[in-house]
Amino acid sequence: MGAAGSKLEKALGDQFPEGERYFGFENFGNTCYCNSVLQALYFCAPFREQLLEHSANSRADSEENLLTCLEDLFSQITSQKKKTGVIAPKRFVQRLKKQNELFRSYMHQDAHEFLNYLLNELVDILEKEAKVTKTDHETLSSPEKISNGSKAPQENGVHKEPIVTWVHKIFQGILTNETRCLRCETVTARDETFLDLSLDIEQNSSITSCLKNFSSTETLHAEDKFFCDKCCSLQEAQKRMKIKKPPHILVIHLKRFKYIEQLGRYKKLSYRVVFPLELKLSNTVEEYVDIEYSLFAVVVHVGSGPNHGHYVSLVKSHNHWLFFDDETVEMIEESAVQTFFGSSQEYSSNTDHGYILLYESLGTR
């Protein structure tokens, strides 16, 4: 990054955050999808803190996996003597390709699929670790074994609490799927967890309107009738999805790639979708009247179609906005973020569109 690095240092001058590092990532042919997401996660403060803390407390002999490779990469950045530069996330990318054949090809990959896979993989690794730790602890504290050498019988029917990892604490929210029978008015509610929200988009819309559509009421009738347990029959009903528990870090995925039946393929929607720097989740459920979020990262898809293109990311660090394009890191004005909203016209030369948005909760207001 050389000259560009010194340019960034010069631009920040005395305002360069103490202890912070701004490093670009080398691209191994088609790994911009990976680089852009990793930059967004690196500048997700609670995620970076927990990852580095886990790294410091983990066993030295732990086997290599995506978590250890990500810890190594983040530790490598934070321990750099230089403030700016370029790092090759080679070990992480090699591990990713070794574990998942989807990312082995040199085809254009989807940044959202990668983020989803990574977070779920980290959860799996942390849950396995927690189970091993729990087993070790129980072995040490368990009473003496039964005389014939067999293990003491387990109590049947005991409800085991799900393991909550630090990834869950940061990204997991709860949705409630409410269905109201229009005959007997009985409301059936089913909770489900989420690590990100995928929103349908429309031309000249906003994140607020997309969220309203996500939570809008839908009537189930004709062939889609709902089986009501109280009526013991299929009935017309109203269905609604609400956010019951908002996450600390809200990840929003804009569904910019839509399958068009007539074309027999996916098409990119370059719709203009306004994403505010400050977002309010109003009236999603009664307990959370106004949850406020602040935007700190945007993964941008550059290109006119789903099977080719490029990914870059914008991140907010210590009140400054930075633009990451693989090895290149530049400072940008906050006002430049709105150039990534999308196009208000179907055919436009602007193909840089916000694809994944990361918001941090500022709490209730």
Image (cartoon, rainbow, N blue to C red):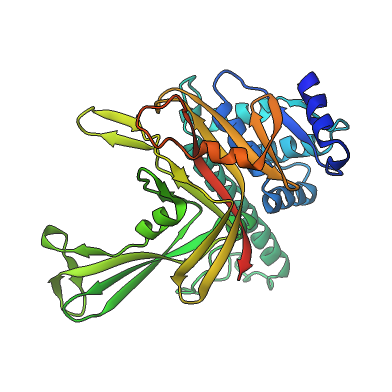
Q: Is residue 269 above or below residue 187?
A: above
- Where does the image place residue 346, in percent across and percent down from the top left? 34, 31
Residue located 70% across and 64% down the image: 137
Front-most of residues 258 and 143? 258
| Image quadrant in which you'd find residue 237 | bottom left
Residue located 59% across and 46% down the image: 122
Front-most of residues 225 and 338? 338
Q: Is residue 315 above or below residue 188?
A: above
User: Is residue 67 shown to the viewer in this render?
Assistant: no
- Where does the image place residue 88, in percent across and percent down from the top left? 70, 24
| Image quadrant in which you'd find residue 142 | bottom right
- Where does the image place residue 198, in percent across and percent down from the top left? 42, 49
- Where does the image place residue 185, in percent across and percent down from the top left? 23, 80
Residue at far left of view: 222
Q: Is residue 72 left or right of residue 209?
A: right
Q: The C terminus is located in which quarter?
A: bottom right
Q: The N terminus is located in which quarter?
A: top right
Q: Is residue 31 above or below residue 228?
A: above
User: Is residue 207 shown to the viewer in this render?
Assistant: yes
Q: How many marks?
A: 0
Q: Is residue 209 left or right of residue 225?
A: right
Residue located 23% across and 28% down the image: 264
Q: Is residue 320 left or right of residue 96?
A: right
